[in-house]
Amino acid sequence: DTEVTQTPKHLVMGMTNKKSLKCEQHMGHRAMYWYKQKAKKPPELMFVYSYEKLSINESVPSRFSPECPNSSLLNLHLHALQPEDSALYLCASSQVTGRDYGYTFGSGTRLTVV
Amino acid sequence: EDKVVQSPLSLVVHEGDTVTLNCSYEVTNFRSLLWYKQEKKAPTFLFMLTSSGIEKKSGRLSSILDKKELFSILNITATQTGDSAIYLCAVASGSRLTFGEGTQLTVNP
């Protein structure tokens, strides 16, 4: 299995809703990432988990709450989002160390906040 | 702060043309430079470069890294309409992957 699987593919939520984005990989990668991508812009790093521990939080608002329950799963819990949070949310994974590694991206969740 | 700059930002060519996309970077703790192609969804991996001067090739696409001058180029020969996409350059530094703004390539028939 060489894929990163993200669900759901599309999500529409109201500003008072609570929802979660899910990401799963079975490549044995011990680093997992959340990126946010707005239209016509490159992906921006939100969070990095390394060995299931949060290692980087790029000053993301607390209405985004990441969780890494085990080495294969990464969640992003959403609460009280704003319309400007509408974007493509990408999950990625990689090896933590070593020379020959690469980042594998999931197909993303397109989120619309209404 | 890590910085990745791509040029040009936009490029329109005709089928059969050869294009060269540029990526320069300033990062601490460089690990690798990666090229991705993005159409409507997630970025699709093209190349990962870690050593200077070694060309990576896949069909009509090739890429090379110059770690002394801190840049990379992505070449596409005999372009096709299916090559139309945004090409993203990203540099891995520590645990971070920093992207450039991308080059929007349009190949007209």
Image: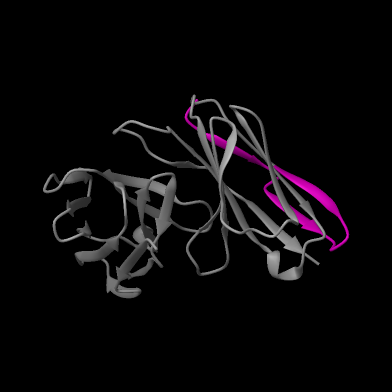
Side of B1 relative to A64 (left or right):
left
Q: Quadrant of residue B2?
A: bottom left
Q: Quadrant of residue B90?
A: bottom left
The correct choice, above or below, for A44 with respect to B92 in the image is below
Q: Is residue B36 visible?
A: yes
Percent across and percent down for residue A51 are 54, 30
Question: Closest to the observer: B86 or A19?
Answer: A19
Report the span colored magenta: A1-21
Q: How is the image coloured?
A: one colour
Residue shown at the point (59%, 49%) measured from the top left: A108
Percent across and percent down for residue B4 are 34, 63
Percent across and percent down for residue A73 are 63, 32
The correct choice, above or below, for A99 with respect to B5 in the image is above
Side of A76 relative to A4 (left or right):
right
Q: Is residue B16 visible?
A: no
Question: Closest to the observer: A5 or B84?
Answer: A5
Question: Closest to the observer: A29 or B28?
Answer: B28
Percent across and percent down for residue A82 are 77, 67
Residue shown at the point (29%, 33%) measured from the top left: A99
Side of A92 relative to A100 (left or right):
right
The correct choice, above or below, for B9 with respect to B82 in the image is below
Question: Closest to the observer: A62 or A104?
Answer: A62
